[in-house]
Image: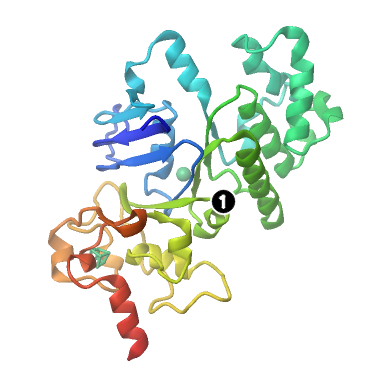
Amino acid sequence: KTDMIERFVGRLTGAAEPPTVHALDNVSLTVMKGEVVGLVGESGCGKSTLGRAIAGMLPVSDGVIAHEGRDIASLRGRARMAMRLGTQIIFQDPMSSLNPRKTVREIIGEAPRVHGLVAARDIDRLVSDLLARVGLDPAMANRYPHQFSGGQRQRIGIARALAVKPEFLICDESIAALDVSIQAQVINLFMDLKRDLGLTLLFISHDLSVVQHISDRVVVMYLGRVVESAPTDEIFGPEGPRHPYTAALLAEVPRIERREHSFSTVKGEIPSPLHPPSGCHFHPRCPFAMDICKTTRPELRDFAGGHAAACHLHDGQGLRDQNSTNQNS
Ligand code: SF4
Ligand code: MG
């Protein structure tokens, strides 16, 4: 498809360098142009690894990351630089990624200057426009990062990412360190940017509620595997999730009108990615685990409406049927 800007196929098994932790296991993820995908899971599930691999920051030992159908590993020179600039990643802690000795003007203007994206005389105007775009006063351009609040620093980080005119933004826990009220403001900023600039977003979060309002689609990972992928409306709507892990994450989302679930929280600790459980990785924590779950890995299967889930419950009776049985009894 021509409108496909990122296509990830085959097996991605994480970093090629030792120590070899197979952080990603048979992950397949496609992000369409203009789409916002929320990538969710507990810490250590591989979502950051996947984000870095997609951004080209992490070599993959086995697998393909493709942009408009071309393997990014095969890109050289200009094409490679264009891909790198076109995909920007925004991290959780803006302080650690903003040089404390540089002014905001230098920080935001650096990449466009180095890459010759704008004429030197136009950099100041670019910086002013970007600061206004992210909701900061352009008069603050001569200040240093420590003179800003956490939320403002995250806005500076966003402005810096936008300075190279990316088409794809990867937000890795970009709002996790902020106060709840500030989180909502920064989410609104991302939604405005998506609408105004037509950005494609991969929004990585451990918190399902964070991605609810921003994502078109939610992809849930557990211990290096994608366990569910579905339109956000479906996950949060009456249909609900198909995978028990997603259902457990959803049960933790505070939302008054949501229907009751038959279990309220994810029980137990996340197993080590070094020694994942056999069969379905989620089986030691799953309230629905069956014998087959301990021995056989459930494949990610497609259902109607762009919904996919990897769970043996759907080999026969589905989770939805099981839920309605619980409710009726
Ligand atoms: Fe639970 Fe089995 Fe489904 Fe895994 S495959 S989520 S253990 S029911
Ligand atoms: Mg992470």
Whether disc 1's CB lies below 8 Å from ligand 2 is answered: no
| Identity, as a three-letter code, of the amino acid under mark 1 | Ile
Q: Is residue 198 at all visible to an observer of this figure?
A: yes
**Image point 66% across, 51% down: which residue?**
183
**Residue 22 spot, x, y in % from top left:** 27, 40
Residue at x 56%, y 37% (from the top left corner)? 91
Q: Is residue 63 left or right of residue 167?
A: left
Q: Residue at x 61, y 47 (%)?
A: 175
- The vertical placement of 258 against 39, above or below, is below
Q: Give the quadrant of the N terminus.
A: top left
Image position, residue 144 (x, y; %)? 77, 28
Q: Is residue 125 shown above or below 9?
A: above
- Considering the image in quadrants, where does the C terminus appear? bottom left
Q: Is residue 43 left or right of residue 151?
A: left
Choose between 125 and 107: the one closer to the eye: 125
Q: Is residue 103 visible?
A: no
| Residue 224 horizontal/vertical position (percent) | 31, 46
Most extreme residue toward the right is 139
For residue 143, side relative to residue 111 (left or right) = right
Residue placed under numbered mark 1 in the picture: 214
The answer to which image quadrant residue 93 occupies is top right
